[in-house]
Amino acid sequence: MEAAGGIDRLGAVGRPPRSDLGLIEHADRALDVLHGKWKVHLLVFMARGIHRHSRLLECLPGASKKVMTDALRALERDGLVARRIFAEVPVRVEYSLTPLGWTITEPLVALSEWGEAHRREVADARVRARRAPRAAA
């Protein structure tokens, strides 16, 4: 990478500057919180007002109850989701975004907008990559 004036920011030994490593580390940490097939879905549905366990499961076609529960527990562990159990018969369980969980909604919207704005470019690049002969490594 080149900084202003054409000076190589990677330095003589080819290592990225600490600020880049920090940026990568923080991005990886954030992506790790979202990693999983259903976590983003669950966050979006909760932000849209769906809170009951059974209703969330209905929104995830193909997801098993166990897989969804594991995703919810991971989001709860990471502080993005709160679980509330109601002493009713049958027991009612509701999930909601915590204040920390709400902070991830804006970056998710931005990521979605990027995906929509660049979907055609990405699709075209993938087609070109499939058609291009692979060079020997």
Image (cartoon, rainbow, N blue to C red):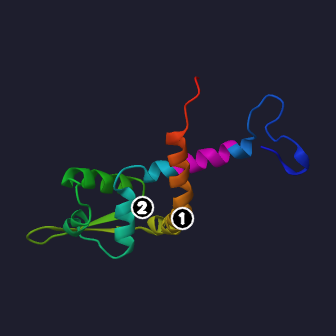
Q: Quadrant of the C terminus?
A: top right
Residue at point 44%, 65% (across, down): 101
Say what amino acid the circle numbered 2 marks: Leu
- Residue 107 is marked as 1
117 in the magenta segment: no
Closest to the observer: 125 or 86?
125
Q: Is residue 29 magenta?
A: yes
Question: Start and end of the magenta stretch?
Answer: 21-30
- Say which of marks 2 and 1 sits in front: 1
Q: Which residue is mark 2?
A: 80
Estimate the x, y position of residue 122 in percent, counting from the top left: 54, 54
Q: Nearer the viewer, residue 56 or 130?
A: 130
Q: Secondary structure at mark 1?
A: helix
Place residue 57 in its image quadrant: bottom left
What's the residue type where badge 1 is placed? Pro
Task: Label 2: state its secondary structure.
Answer: loop
Q: Mark 2: few, some, or many residues within 10 Å (few <14, many ≥20)? A: many
